[in-house]
Image (cartoon, helix red, strand yellow):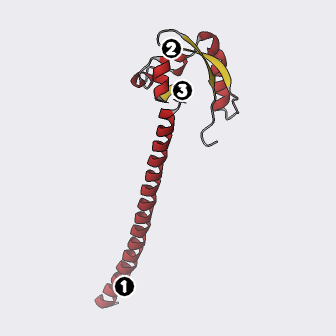
Amino acid sequence: MSKIEGKDKTRKKLIIELAKLRQHIIKLEKSETENKRAAKALRQSEQKFRSIAECSPNMIFINSKGQVVYANRRCEEILGYKRKEFYSPDFHFLTLVAKESQSFVKKSYRKYLNGEEVFPYEYTLLTKKGERIEAIINTKLKGN
């Protein structure tokens, strides 16, 4: 095999490799565009949720494994805690639940974690000042 034939084969391999790289770049660009669209749709969805939740006359909590990850303005007004208090890693949702309601709330939460349907139920909340509030909890599994 001559040097020229070897160079031609190397050149052909480089051209093929370059074509593969171009295809890969096109796929990455398409994926990036799709990710940007999805991120924009998520931001818009979160914005709509917050707009609705902040205007709600009801308290709205989002609880993840006992940690409050979202509480609307009504929660602050009724319960007397600031959001930074709700969101603190040291703050557990059960802090808000009266002792006599805790076992039922825990049982319902276990059902929820197991994917079982949890029907709305009444329980007693405690404000920061210790005042009692009768409430109804209505929960849905994510994705349902």
Is residue 73 shown left or right of residue 144? left
SS type, badge 3: loop
Q: Nearer the viewer, mark 3 or mark 1?
A: 3
Assign the N terminus to one quadrant of the image: bottom left
- Of the two numbered discs 2 and 3 on the same chain, state the one appearing first in sequence: 3
Considering depth in this image, is 40 or 4 the residue closer to the camera? 40
Residue kind at label 1, given as amino acid type:
Lys
- Of the two numbered discs 1 and 2 on the same chain, state the one appearing first in sequence: 1
Residue drawn where x is 45% and y is 17% of the image = 80
In this figure, which residue is indicated by the disc labeled 3? 59
Q: Which mark is residue 127?
A: 2
Residue kind at label 2, given as amino acid type:
Thr
Q: CA distance from mark 2 to mark 3?
A: 13 Å
Q: How many numbered marks, from 0 up?
A: 3
Is residue 37 shown left or right of residue 96? left
Check whether the beta carbons of the residues at disc 2 and disc 3 lie within 8 A of each other.
no
Q: CA distance from mark 3 to mark 1?
A: 71 Å
In this figure, which residue is indicated by the disc labeled 1? 9
Question: Up-down: is 124 above or below 40?
Answer: above
> Looking at the picture, how far across and down is residue 56, in whole percent?
52, 32
SS type, badge 1: helix
- Of the two numbered discs 3 and 1 on the same chain, state the one appearing first in sequence: 1
> Looking at the picture, how far across and down is residue 91, in whole percent?
46, 20
Question: Up-down: is 60 above or below 32?
Answer: above
Considering depth in this image, is 101 or 73 the residue closer to the camera? 73
Considering depth in this image, is 135 or 21 the residue closer to the camera? 135
Residue drawn where x is 33% and y is 86% of the image = 6
> Looking at the picture, how far across and down is residue 28, in whole percent?
41, 64
Check whether the beta carbons of the residues at disc 1 and disc 2 lie within 8 A of each other.
no
Residue kind at label 3, given as amino acid type:
Met
How many neighbours does mark 2 have within 10 angstroms: few (below 14), some (14-19), or many (20 or more)? Answer: many
